Image (cartoon, rainbow, N blue to C red):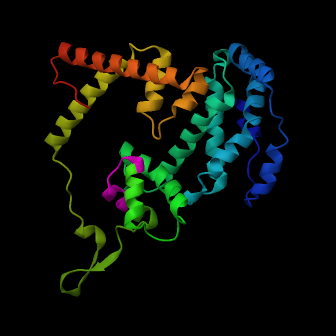
Amino acid sequence: MTKNALLPAISPDGNLSRYLDQIRQFPMLEADEEYGLATAWKERGDVEAAHKLVTSHLRLVAKIAMGYRGYGLPVADLISEGNLGMMHAVKKFEPEKGFRLATYAMWWIKAAIQEYILRSWSLVKIGTTSAQKKLFFNLRRLKNKIQDADSGHLQPEQITTIAETLDVSEADVISMDQRMAGHDHSLNATIKGDGEQMTEWQDWLEDDTPDQETSFAEAEEFNARKNLMVEAMSALNEREQRIIHARRLSEPPLTLEELAGEFGVSRERVRQIEVRAFEKLADGVRKKAEEQNLLPYDG
């Protein structure tokens, strides 16, 4: 979509009100008009139609972006990243499935904003596992429900509540809370060493990474299992792949209600498809592993 440059943007002085006034000028689309524009883009590559689809949803992007202001990043950047997610949603949108673009686009908008936040925050602070990312994006929201997010560290009973809600350990909650409240420090910061001699912080850091042989073996095993998963996923149909990815491989996962709106079916139907698809996937991985004489896949 070459009209990206024509999308409204927050001015350098950060005037958010002016930007919101600008995007309110773009009309909301009726269902039949949206369908016609989406069809024109998909079938004929009509850039003008795609541009109308994007601009009519800029208010949705701004609303979602506002929900991520607590991470200390410029609102203008959050909105800009969300707009990129909106454009990607328009490119992928399939109007013939019968659901509205806003329902489908919400996932892409949130994904784009969250990816930007993860890139911007220190990896040392947030960690890289799916559980840590889930905790990172939900801790502030849960803290806001039980206390002021910036009022200090959590109380023991609050830690227990959050750990149970997110299905993580209390130690993980405490660690993430401390990381999000802390600040980055330079590895070149000076500290007092033995004999009161000044030295740099990095001189006291130990390298606890595995040796090259261990790393190579782990990488080989990971790649083998990844290939098994990719091959097994290819046996699923497009809808099954989408549901498995959204429910099992994304952080945070989409709800049954969101996917029900995307596919125009009931929540129970989505749950049934997910269960059946996961069983097919597990069977496929197991068979592939047996064919290739690999160890049973347990993860």
Q: Can you say whether 170 is above or below 64 in the image? A: below
- In the image, 103 versus 77, the foreground residue is 103
Side of 27 where 223 appears, left or right: left
Q: Is residue 126 visible?
A: no
89 inside magenta stretch:
no
Q: Can residue 242 be seen in this view?
A: yes
Query: Residue drawn 38% across and 43% down?
Result: 130
- In the image, 265 versus 77, the foreground residue is 265
Query: Residue drawn 77% across and 44% down?
Result: 8
- Specify the segment rendered in magenta: 165-175
Side of 36 where 104 appears, left or right: left
Residue 232 placement (x, y as % from top left): 34, 17
Image-quadrant location for residue 60? top right
Side of 263 where 152 appears, left or right: left
- In the image, 177 versus 166, the foreground residue is 166
Query: Residue drawn 41% across and 56% down?
Result: 161
Image-quadrant location for residue 257? top right
Residue 187 placement (x, y as % from top left): 34, 67
- In the image, 40 versus 144, the foreground residue is 144
174 inside magenta stretch:
yes
